[in-house]
Amino acid sequence: MSATTTTTTNPPGQMPPNGAANVDPLDAADYDPVDHLNTIFSHPSTLSSVSRVSQTLHEYEDELDNDIGALVEDQVTSNAESVERIQAAKADLTELFKKIDDVRDRASSTESAITEMTADIKQLDNAKKNLTQSMTVLKRLQMLTTAYDQLRALGRTRQYRDCAQLLQAVIQLMAHFKSYRSIDQIALLSRNVADIQRELLEQVCEDFEMAFARGEVGQSRPVLSEGCLVIEALGDHAKSRLVTWYCNFQLREYRQVFRNNEEAGSLDNISRRYAWFRRILKIYDEEYGAIFPAAWKVNEILANVFCEGTREDFKGILSRSVRNGQTIDVNLLLSCLQETLDFEHSLERRFINPSRHSTDTFASGEATVFGQAISEAFEPYLSVWVEAQDKQLAALMPKYRQQPIKPPDEEFDSHIVISSSTDLFTFYRHSFQQCAKLSTGASLADLAKVFAKYLDHYAQTVLLSYISERPTGHTPSKVPDTEDLILVLNTADYCYTTCNQLEEKIKGRLDRSLKQTVDLQSQADSFMGIASAAVRGLVRKVEVDLEPCWREMRNTPWNRLEGVSDQSSYVGELMSKTQTRSSELLQLLHKQQYARAFADHVVELISTVFIATIFQCKPVSETGAEQMLLDTYTLKTGLSSLLPNPAPASFVKRVNASFAKIEALLKTLQVQPSPPEALVQAYLIHIADQSNTNFRKILDLKGIRSRQEQNHLLELFQLHRASDRYAPNLQQSNPILTALQTSTAPTTSSVSQGLGLGTAAASIGASTLPTRFDPSMLGSAIISAAKDGVDRFGTPMGSSSINPIAGLAPPGAGGVSISGASASPSSSSTPGPLGLGLGQTQTGESSISSAGNLNENLKNIGKFFRRDLGGFGGRFGRGGDDAS
């Protein structure tokens, strides 16, 4: 058939292309006879070969039938051979099983024969083993009987050294006869051995009692020392009896004097108790130490018994005082505690290895035997001691506040901290170490709460007072100078770091069940809030220097400029003052985190004041907007080099992000109002919001005041913003324009308030609002920021849905609030100075914020400030290079 397909699928006399082998279509899996016939008879002229093709197909069919028949015949023959091979294999297996059974039978018969041959030998072996065992038992019985007789004789003559050796041998031999106690003679011997053990124990104890009672210990020392060897041989029960008797004998006088006598047993005479026991230990070392074996540790057991009894005495004395309504004298309690701790430490030094861990080592796993042996009795009453610590700290806080921030005769150093902070943590460390020795439970947890309370107090009433103070009457507050701000910043950073370390140490010593109750993170956040206020105070120094430059910018006629230049006259002066003041301040900041934070806030200050000043310069022509845009590029370039080279890439990115909002505004102002569609499209591209109010602000800024022209542009704006081209990309309202005020009063107060950098005059009232910056009011501005908490500029306190620290926008933040007043005409909002993002809602009379609100605001500031600086390199509060 392959020949047929070859002649039918290829022209006569022509080989397949490239000499490829022919494939029979009849062998194909998807064979289609119609397609095959169409291939063979592809042209009417090929129909003449129908007969020949039919004949070839019949021949091919016959050939296939023959092949199939041959294959069937071969398979039948192959099956018959397989059956024969299987039968042969079965016969072989049957023969193999027969041989295996035969081998098994012969092995059994061989084993029986060998057993008969060796039966006599095995009997002889058993007889030998039994005989040997009987001889061993008889020999041991003889040794036991002999040793027993000797032991009785030696016991009568009190030869205790030999008795101890024989007694050990008798006890060991008697252990071999436990299984023979059913024999009467062995049972009798066992009873006799037990009797002599009891007799020896009673005899040795009697010798001790007589010697101690008569005061003849020195003469009887050899006999008593050898008697201890007998007690050692008798076992632990005998040793425990003798040691217990000795401890009771030694402490009998102590119990009679201090337990039965109310005056002698009072806490006032606690030193007499310890002096008495020290004398007992001295007597032991001189007279009794050589009697008892060192391994018994009799003196240590005696100390434990003394501590247990004394602890119970103290518990009874203290509980009776409380039940009788008596007030425990704190000084007496502390004195007793100290003496008790000293006594316990002396016992530890005496009985514990010299390598005992220090009480400051929290990772120590060695348990101290006398750590709280007696002082445990005072633990339930440590609340009195904790209250005393509270009172001491309460008395220290006013002293710290009255101290000058720096001694007058001391030179300023940008690395030092305020001395009161180190004094406070030194006090904390001593109190913590003392309490940890007394208690690792509830008392230590209560002390940690006291620590937290006065950390907050120190942050609010001491550190914050150095950089801020509300004016009283007509006396302005003290203005913090640069040195004060640097010292407070260093101190806040020191307190933040030390606060975290203190928490770790307390948790390392506290019981596991109470570890979760200690959390000083909120106090650390408060100190970080103080650090934020100090950094903002430094930024305020820059703002004061730049005010003349902003005034010059406001006085420039931006609507009448005829041409543009590289930069305006005020820009050079602004950059010069910024670089000079920033360089001076950055030299005083020795941590990269704070230097970076200062630079970031200076950038936000300039960018925010710049955009606020733009709205005070209206109307602004297209040429004026172009000049402002060039000024923006100059400022951006200059501020990028504010930090020492090379400037971190993240800082340059933040500078660009801060000025991006200004560039978007100025690019919109550059577009001429004719044709009107161009201005509308520019607004939708750069400002990208749907607010009619914001669009009107842009028209007002460009000087388009005609009602008709404004309405026409507003209609176009509403039409375009709804189109598919712009609608998906528009926000509801651009936060920058939303916060901008349309007031044109060119006062420092309006700009500074919009920054959250306003003077304190804004919080005093509109009647006293100054027309220029008054540095004497800065102190009250700082304290006002933390005490007049609102969550965002122009938002009354309590609105928890808005970022409470808006003035500290993180790098890359899209919008910065610039509003200086609430939209409501019935109330005015005063943003927090120094960019703290806090304000006050005034309703006719000033409200007095509680200390809790102040503390909460400081914590919120600190949390955000710490988070904002998280990417500046290194863990905050620790040294580290600035991240690039």
Image: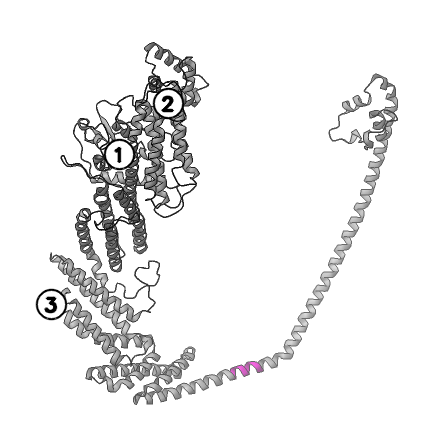
Viewer-proximal residue, 541 or 305?
541
Pick the quarter of the image with the N terminus: top right
If you read the primary sequence from the N terminus, does the residue marked by circle 1 or circle 2 appear first? Answer: 2
**Amino acid type shown at disc 2:** Gln
Relative image position of residue 686 (x, y in whole percent): 41, 23
- The amino acid type of the residue labelled 3 equals Glu
Residue with the mark numbered 2: 732
Q: Which residue bears the numbered disc 1?
A: 833
Query: What secondary structure is marked by label 1?
Result: helix
Q: Amino acid at mark 1?
A: Pro
- Callout 3: SS: loop
Q: Magenta part mainly helix, strand or loop?
A: helix
Q: Earlier in the sequence, mark 3 or mark 1?
A: 3
Point out residue 355 in the picture as x, y percentages from the top left corner.
Answer: 34, 67
Identify the magenta region: 124-131
* Of 427 and 835, the residue lying toward us: 835
